[in-house]
Amino acid sequence: MTIALERPVGTTDPATLVEPEVMERLAVRISKDHPDTGLPTARRIVGQAAAFLVASAALPGAELSPSKAVDTGWHAWILHTVDYAAFCERVAGRFIHHVPTPDDESIKGGPAAARQRTLDAISAAGFRIDHDLWPDAAKMGDCTQCHAGCSDSPSGAKK
C-alpha cells in the first residue's frame, strides 16, 4: 500500500498561497517601508509570511514566531486589513491575531527554540523555507510597530 501526501513536505512555494495582486501590494509596501529591501526580496518575505501564518493556524498554541524579516511581511499584511482578513479566513477559517510577547524570556524555550519550532512547522506544512529570511526569530525590540518580539495567537487575542 502506498500513501501519498497531499503536498510533499518542503516542496511548495508558499508564495502560491497569495493572490498576485495582493503579493504586489504587500511587496510594494515592504519596499517603501524598508528602502533597503527590493521588490524581489519583499515578494520572498510575503511568501514566508504566508507560510508562517498557515503553520501558525495549523498548530494553535505552539508559540511560533517569525524572523525579523518575516515579521515585516506580517506587519505589512496587517496594514492591509481586508486582504489579511480574507487570507486568514481562507487558510485558517479564522482571523490570526498578532500578539507581541512582553519579553524574550516569555517565549517558550527562548527565541532560538521558537525559530526551530516555526521552521519545523512550516516544513511539516509542506512549504519550502527561504533560509536567508530566517537567520533568527524576532526578538524584543525587533518588532518595530509593537516594540516587542511577536508571536501568533491562532486561538484569539488574550484578554
Image: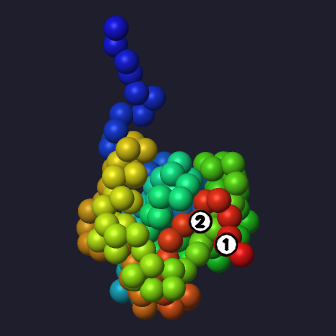
Q: Residue at x 68, y 70 (%)?
A: 157
| x and y, in percent, of residue 109 in the image | 34, 70
| Residue 43 in which image quadrant | bottom left
Q: Which mark is residue 36?
A: none
At mark 1, the secondary structure is loop
CA gap, disc 1 to disc 2?
Answer: 8 Å
Residue 58 or 70: which is nearer the viewer? Answer: 58
Mark toward the start of the polypeptide (1 vs 2): 2
- Tell me the amino acid under the disc marked 1: Lys
Q: Nearer the viewer, residue 158 or 80?
A: 158
The image quadrant that residue 131 belongs to is: bottom left
Mark 1 is surrounded, within 10 Å at the Cα level, by few (under 14), some (14 to 19) or many (20 or more) other residues, namely few
Residue hosting label 2: 153
**Left of 54 or right of it: where is 34?**
left
| Callout 1–callout 2 Cβ contact below 8 Å | yes
Foreground mark, 1 or 2?
1
Q: Position of residue 40 (x, y in %)?
A: 38, 68
Mark 2: which secondary structure?
strand
Colour scheme in use: rainbow
Question: Does the rendering let one see residue 90?
Answer: yes
Question: As shown in the figure, which amino acid type bears the numbered disc 2?
Answer: Ser
Q: Position of residue 102 (x, y in %)?
A: 51, 85
Is residue 131 left or right of 140 when viewed as pictured? left
In this rendering, does residue 39 appear at all? no
The C terminus sits in image quarter: bottom right
Q: Count numbered badges in the picture.
A: 2
Q: Which mark is residue 158?
A: 1
Which residue sits at x=36%, y=34%?
8
Rendered residue at 69%/60% (across/down): 95
Q: Quadrant of the N terminus?
A: top left
Looking at the image, is 154 positioned above or below residue 157? Answer: above
